[in-house]
Image: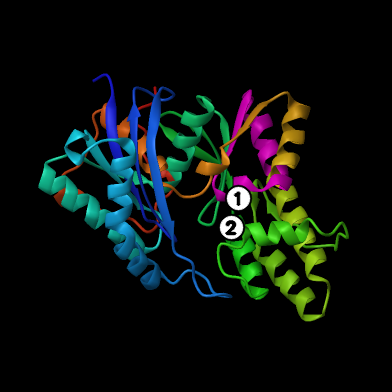
Amino acid sequence: MEEVKCLGIESTAHTFSSSVVSLRNLTEGKILSNVKAVYNPPRGSGIHPSEASRHHTKVASDIILSSLKEAKLIIKDLDVIAYSAGPGLGPCLRVGATIARVLSSYYNIPLVPVNHAIGHIELGCFLTKLIEPVVLLISGGHTLITTYKDKRWRIFGETLDLTIGQLVDQLGRELGYSSPAGPIIEKLASNSKNYLLMPYTIKGNDVSFSGLLTYAKKLLSKGYKVEDICYSVQETAFAMLCETFERAIAFCEKEEAMVVGGVAANKRLAFMLNSLADRYGVNLKVVPFEYSGDCGAQIAVVGALAFKAGFSVSVEKSLVKRSWRIDQVDIYWRS
């Protein structure tokens, strides 16, 4: 099988996205399309699963048709259809899974369920051309450090409570902004250099952000400047991530490192991580901004790789898993 054309459907949380890729192997191929629509909750609130799922249902047809049109293909040209099976919000996951099942069954196209986090990692490897880097995955749903070993991505550190994305979004909601709040918190933080001492919690190589959020809310209630709080929270959280990432790089003794996930778009974090990489002489790559957030391309890439390796499932056996760790996922396409 020389080349695989895969339609990937992403629907784990606030984003519904469809992408078509044409892949030869881990690093060779093209992303032919990547179309998305994002559910925006009311100001000051987070993602409501049922509202987000209704949004996905409304936009799904147009998004999928647009991705096929942009790829200059019809659905019968596809070799495989992939969907985000988890982790994520149950109602949102079911929208993408149902659509994928219907298309697979009606057009008799093989079906591949994809772990959303593995999608971030494998898309990052595909785009950066790194093979087996130490990976920092940071997003609304994930905060972990991993590298590949013996057919699985192994976790070397993770959050014990909130993800970095949840920390930022909940701080944003406290300030009256809706999720995702990353860009506005980054902008507010850039307007301050006044660091306020914050809780710094690392246990082994795991991080904890709940105390940091609680303390930030306490300072807000006392009238401290919003810009100073955002700056201090960001600096503290990013320093924790850098410390644990540095330990993982030293332990794994690898020369490649990669940052993926929506928070990878933060310029301050990129600067801190690049400084770390320079000290260790590590080739650090950050996933391009266009693909840092949730997107169909991350699902399509894994779907194509898995199918090329001989993996697919019947519609009857296709499931969604709201909780699904990456170290529980067998990687069929890597040696």
**Left or right relative to 54: residue 185:** right
Q: Quadrant of the N terminus?
A: top left
Residue drawn at (70%, 37%), measured in percent from left and top?
A: 246
The answer to which quarter of the image holds residue 250 is top right
Relative side of 26 to 242, left or right = left
Say which quadrant the C terminus sits in.
top left
Identify which residue is drawn at 80% across, 62% down.
Answer: 198
**Numbered label attached to residue 263:** 1
Name the main secondary structure of what is drawn in magenta.
helix
In the rendered image of this protein, does residue 309 appear above or below residue 259? above
Q: Which residues are magenta?
A: 242-268
| C-alpha separation, residue under disc 1 versus residue under disc 2 | 7 Å
Mark carried by residue 67: none
Q: In the rendering, at what x and y percent does residue 17 appear?
A: 38, 51
> In the image, is 110 to the left or to the right of 86?
left
Residue sitting at x 82%, y 80%: 222
Residue at the image position 75 percent from the left and 63 percent from the top: 230
For label 2, the residue is 165
Lower sequence index among marks 1 and 2 = 2
Which amino acid does the dot numbered 2 rest on?
Gly
Q: Label 1's element? A: helix
Tell me, yes or no, whether the two marked residues, 1 and 2, touch with CB atoms within 8 Å.
Answer: yes
Question: In this view of the protein, can residue 77 be seen by the observer?
Answer: yes
Tell me the kind of residue under disc 1.
Val
Residue 223 appears at what percent x and percent y? 82, 79
Q: Is residue 257 magenta?
A: yes
As drawn, the residue found furthest toward the top would be 2
Q: Is residue 36 above or below residue 112?
A: below
Left or right: residue 22 compared with residue 255: left
Q: Is residue 161 visible?
A: no
- Asked which secondary structure carries label 2, the reply is helix
